[in-house]
Image (cartoon, rainbow, N blue to C red):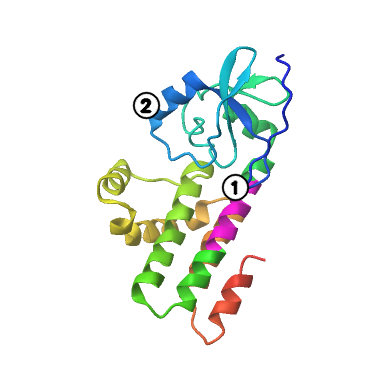
Amino acid sequence: MISIKTNEKCHHCGTSSVLVESEVVIRIKELLQPNFKTLGTSVAVHGNRYHPICPSCDSYALGLDLVEAFPVLTQSGKITTIHDLMFMDSSLIDKKRQSLVTSLKECIHRFHSSEEDAIWWAAENEALRLMFQYLMESSALSVTPELLKAIEEDGFSDHATSVAELLEEQANRLPDADRRVVLDCFEALWQGGEDRDSQSLNMFD
């Protein structure tokens, strides 16, 4: 057990950060090329340099989808992995889902409050992208390698319709909480009526 004197929490979701050795961060960047949301400035711990990272917001970067995830150091001084953290603290998934819902509400508001095609189109795509990313990291979404490659090569927006169809097809296979997020978001985005905006913001409550 390593003695650590810190209690750093994620500014996005409030989850306690873990520490990742600088050399491991370099390996992560080389292997996964992730878009870190919470990679912090390195700090010294017993002569080594570590970066604070949120295990909830950056679970993919820490190796959630890998058979052998990268080692992380908890603030209690234990060396572990994102897999063990997820097993020990299922609330991480709940926090990721709540963060997703907050972002989706913002997208839905932009979608319904703008009369400019470019703005509502971008908001719709962003909502689909956020759901897709979350479900890829946290749930049982089945995606073909061809679609993943196409998204990587062309960008998400070119395949947003395919993603929407995929989410709709697989919604009933998802855990109950995730299925509700997907179906509620679809209804909030594409429902009719003059009060659709106010309804959409309350859809997840």
Res 30 label: 2
Which amino acid type is marked by label 2?
A: Glu
Write the residue at 47% across / 19% down. Answer: 23
Q: Are marks 2 and 1 in contact (CB under 8 Å)?
A: no
The x and y percentages for residue 5 are 74, 24
Tell me: 76 left or right of 84.
Answer: right
Tell me: 34 left or right of 153.
Answer: right
Upstream in the sequence, badge 2 or badge 1? 2
The x and y percentages for residue 62 are 51, 31
**Quadrant including the N terminus:** top right
Which amino acid type is marked by label 1?
A: Lys
Q: Secondary structure at mark 2?
A: helix
Whether the magenta-drawn stretch holds residue 187 is answered as: no
Q: Secondary structure at mark 1?
A: helix
Tell me: 82 left or right of 1.
Answer: left
Considering depth in this image, is 20 or 104 the residue closer to the camera? Answer: 20
Residue tagged 1: 96
Considering depth in this image, is 51 or 175 the residue closer to the camera? Answer: 51
Whether the magenta-drawn stretch holds residue 103 is answered as: yes
**Quadrant including the C terminus:** bottom right
Mark-to-mark CA distance, 2 and 1: 25 Å
Write the residue at 32% across / 58% down. Answer: 157
When the figure is inspected, residue 2 is found, relative to residue 11, above or below; the finding is above
The region drawn magenta spans 94-104
